[in-house]
Every structure is written in structure tokens, then in C-alpha cells.
Amino acid sequence: MKCLGIEATAEKLGIGIVNIKSEILTNITKYKPLTTGIHPREAAQHHAENIKDLIKEALQKVELSFKDIDLISFSQGPGLGPSLRVAAVAARTLALKYSLPLVGVNHCVAHIEIGRLKTEARDPLTVYVSGGNTQITAFVSGRYRVFGETLDIALGNLIDQFARTANLGNPGGPVVEKLAKEGNYIELPYTVKGMDLSYSGLLTAAKRALNNYSVEDVCYSLQEVSFSMLVEVAERALAHTGKEELLIAGGVGVNRRLQEMLNSMADERGSGFFTTPENLLGDNGAMIAWLGILEYTHGKRMKPEDSFVRQRWRTDEVEVLWR
């Protein structure tokens, strides 16, 4: 079995082809360059203009045609509505045209499963951090339960918004990480509420701090405070769930300082630490294809008329049939 997966939840458009042996045959991504934040309609227009050629390119890379594809999967949610609808319409059209089964999958769960596939983690607590999501999840009682999450903006959104204010470009993560290596600590608000985090106050304070401190000092402190909040909640979640593995997933996971802090905490607890391979940390079609295979081979079926998008589809609403 080979599955073609379509990822389009935000500004990235990804096409991946994965087979039932868990081999990633191809995985290509095209994204709309950003100078400010993501504009949903512009992102959707970009995806609509490029999706046909990107699918064609993905097939040609591995010398396949739709005669070789057995399943179509797509990111059904959560995400930006206009972007999600491009993926849904394309997937629905391909499924009907070539008489192929169709599966809509949860974007967040796809990040977890591609991490489990490509690391030695079997039953981890997952720290999922991206531009739109910050969640700490673990598999309990048939679902990926959320043991901590952001109450407002996500970690990636925090860093990108700050970087735009500081004229550091977009995406801001790599530049902030580089500048942070030259900075010193300044006081910024640390907000953990129970098992959840709040980053909006930290963002406001960091922006104001640019008036009185060097950008290097603010970058360093922004990373240290925001990451420490995440590590605190992750450590408590590890203790609560009794999991012995910690997995990092999502685009912000490329940050070496974040990896270092989580690894140190896991090591102190005697837990294994795993990072999803860098080329699979960000949004991509391969993770959608792989989750499509998992769900379809464990009984999930979808009619084309049921392939509507789910912008606020929570991770813990997905019934995990394959574990």
C-alpha cells in the first residue's frame, strides 16, 4: 500500500508518499514566503496555485502515477480554514477521480506519529511545539491526552511575533536562537498556571524590553523563560503519567537550546529523550501520509461528503485505533 498525503494547515504546502512498510518515498514542501504574519487567504491562494504541480513533482520524483497510489490522506485540522479547504478539496477530487479511499487526519497526531516512527520512542510523553500549537501529550486510555498546553499564543508564534517587532525577519526562530548565544539574562514574566502556560504577557514584556536592553539580551531571556516554562510543565507531566520517554515534535523543536533543556530534564529523571529528525519536525506531507496508513489499516473509513475541515480539532478528540 502507498499513501499520498497532503499537508496544508498554514503557510506550508506539503506532499508526501509513504508505503505500508513505513518507508518515506518522497516528501516535498513549498511555502509562501512571509514578511509579516500568515494571511490565511494569501496562504490558501498560494496552495491552490501550486498544489497540482507539487503533486505531479512528488509522483515524478519516484516514478509513480496514480495507478500506484492506494490511498489519499489530508490534513483535516486543526489549522487555518482557507488552507485546510485547499487540501480537502484536492484530496476529495483525487479520491473521486481515481476511485481511491480517502482519510482525513489530525495534524497534531501526525506530528506525534512521525516522531514515533522515526525515533526509538515507543510510548513517549510528547512536547509538540510549533507556530500554532504548544501541547504536552501522552497516550492514555485510547487517546493522546493533553497534559498541558498554551492558554493563548503558541511558542512559535511568540518567537515570530517578537522577531518581527525587533526587525529580525520571518521566521524569527533561527535568528533569535543565534542572537541569544550572545546575550545575558534580564527579568521577564514567567507564567505557568497549573499544567498550562501563558505566553502573551511574556511577548508584551519582551517587546517593551527592546527599549532598554540589547536585542541579544532580550532574545536570550525570551528563550530561557519560555523554554523553562515548557520544561517545568513537561517534567510534571512525566511524573504524573509515569512515562519513561520524552519526544519533541513540531517546527520549534529544531531549536538546540530547547532540545538541550528538555534533554537535561529527561536525563535527570532517568527518561529517554528523542527528537524527531529535523527534516520531519516542521509541517510535511509524509506525516499525513503515514497517519493515513495507520488509520486506514486499522479500520477508519471516510465518505467524500464527510471530508469537511475541522479548524479546532483537538488532539484528544482523536480515537487512536492503532495502539
Image (tube, rainbow, N blue to C red):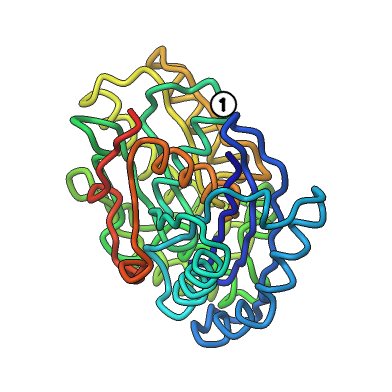
Q: Please indicate whether residue 187 sits to the left or right of residue 42 in the image.
A: left
Disc 1 secondary structure class: loop
Residue located 63% across and 66% down the image:
171
Residue nearest the observer in this picture, 169 or 149: 149
90 in relation to 315, above or below: below
Q: Which of these two is toward me, 96 or 170?
A: 96
Q: How many marks?
A: 1
| Residue that lies at the very extreme toward the top in this rendered image | 270
Q: Is residue 320 visible?
A: yes
**Going by the image, does 280 lie left or right of 123?**
right
In this view of the protein, can residue 212 be seen by the observer?
no
Tell me if residue 71 comes above or below residue 166 in the rendering.
Answer: above
| Quadrant position of the C terminus in the picture | top left
Q: Position of residue 175 (x, y in %)?
A: 68, 60
Q: Residue at x 30, y 26 (%)?
A: 238
Residue matched to label 1: 119
Quarter of the image with the N terminus is top right
Residue 318 coordinates in the image, percent (x, y): 27, 48
**Residue 125 falls in image quadrant:** top left
Disc 1 marks a residue whose amino acid type is Thr
- What x and y, as percent, mark residue 21? 60, 29
Residue 221: where, in percent of width, then height? Answer: 51, 53
State the residue in front, 285 or 272: 285
- In the displayed structure, 309 sits above or below 105; it is below
Crowd rating for badge 1 (residues with CA inside 10 Å; few <14, some 14–19, many 20+): some
Q: Nearer the viewer, residue 281 or 168?
A: 281
Which residue is depicted at the point 38% across and 23% down? 123
Residue in the picture at 51% in, 64% down: 95
